Image: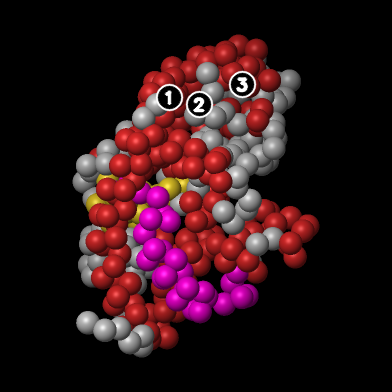
Amino acid sequence: MTGAAQSQSSPNAAFNPRVFSGIQPSGGLTLGNYLGAIRRFVDMQESGVQTIYCVVDLHAITVWQEPEALRRQTRELTAGYLAAGLDPEKSILFNQSQVAEHAQLAWIFNCVVRMGWMKRMTQFKDKAGKNAENASLGLFGYPALMAADILLYHATHVPVGEDQKQHLELTRDTAAKFNHDYGVDFFPLTEPVIEGTATRVMSLRDGTKKMSKSDPSDASRINMTDDADTIARKIRKAKTDPDALPSEPGGLEGRAEARNLVNIYAALSDSTIEEVLRDAGGKQFSEFKPMLADLAVTRLAPISEEMGRLMQHPDEIDRVLGRGAERARALAAPILARTYDIVGMVRST
Ligand code: AQP
């Protein structure tokens, strides 16, 4: 986290730095979720700020989820958090549905945000596609629940991938409108933290589409539970062009698939694009892809092995989520109570 969070000139100077983020258990974890989000979550945990990480199961049901699959994916995502280095003693880890205050604050925000704001959300347009009339109301209202997730903890910073930037802007607009309408300075104007070489990992089948858990093609993504052979096969079959890699980043212009594989290599090897191309410039993909596959397997195998081990103990995972939910509720309840007071709800004391 930068010093901006603590700076007196920051609009959030009155708030203690606090980080919140979440991932939907809407499928298996992908390399995109890991590089774009979870790795950043771990960095922030280690920076000493208070960190709160959620499995956003209420968001997941905005599109159909088989109940048994949702339960498994919720535990698997938690296992992914733990295996990647999130520590339930240092961070608060929980699933959203166990803290009812998320849904309660979302209702208040449903009455603050405007229809016009929601209609501009590109993710709704992408996910609803041509069949928007048949999309759930929850999918349309998703960003108001997301604003509630974040503002319920007065979070000042949210690590996310590039695709969530517009939703974060809506969160700031929601806080600003609430503060303005009620004449208070109650909610912070949360800042997105979109950093690193892998803020947008693209599909292995189409370099213009983001890698996504719910893409119908399994070959489009690397799942965090894929074994070494599967990872190697998917990378070998990844779409590329016939040219060799350039030795400068400028040479990746107009080569979306090549850029994506170089980005992934840079992120997994903790190096810059320039450094990768200094070594790999001039190589054909037939040579670069096996290098990338080896690196991916080396980096991901320990995480997927640990996920597998943790998944043998679902009770242990549920205990982590339950304990995290208690700690989350302790932070959320007073903020919701104060929100109700500001809005004018009567409550007995
Ligand atoms: N391809 C990606 N590259 C970088 N970051 C990514 N994230 C997702 N995909 C990429 C980041 O992961 C976090 C969790 O995302 P989410 O599960 O809440 O929803 P999403 O962004 O819609 O992710 P998916 O994988 O595409 O899920 P589905 O298919 O269910 O919609 C966010 O921080 C996101 O930026």
The tag earlier along the polypeptide, 3 or 2, is 2
Q: Quadrant of residue 83?
A: top left
Q: Nearer the viewer, residue 95 or 314?
A: 314
Whether residue 91 sits left or right of residue 75 in the image: it is: left
Label 1 neighbourhood size at 10 Å, few (<14), some (14-19), many (20+)?
A: some
Task: Find out if the beta carbon at label 2 lies less than 8 Å from the nearest ligand 1 atom.
Answer: no
Which mark is nearer the camera, 3 or 2? 2
Q: Residue at x 22, y 42 (%)?
A: 89
Question: Which residue is labeled 3 in the image?
Answer: 235
Q: Nearer the viewer, residue 41 or 305?
A: 305
Q: Quadrant of residue 345?
A: bottom left
Given the image, on which type of amino acid does mark 2 rest?
A: Thr
Q: Is 135 above or below relative to 334?
A: above
Question: Which residue is labeled 2 in the image?
Answer: 225
Q: Is 269 above or below relative to 23?
A: above
Residue 149: where, in percent of width, then height?
A: 41, 61
Q: Residue at x 34, y 77 (%)?
A: 339
Residue 334: where, in percent of width, then height?
A: 26, 70
Inter-mark Cα distance, 2 to 1: 8 Å
Per the rendered image, the range of residues in magenta is 92-118
What SS does tag 2 mark? Answer: loop
Given the image, on which type of amino acid does mark 1 rest?
A: Gly
Magenta span has 103?
A: yes
Whether residue 290 sits left or right of residue 331 in the image: it is: right
Given the image, on which type of amino acid does mark 3 rest?
A: Ile
Label 3 neighbourhood size at 10 Å, few (<14), some (14-19), many (20+)?
A: many
Magenta span has 243?
A: no
Question: Which residue is labeled 1 in the image?
Answer: 308
What SS does tag 1 mark? Answer: helix
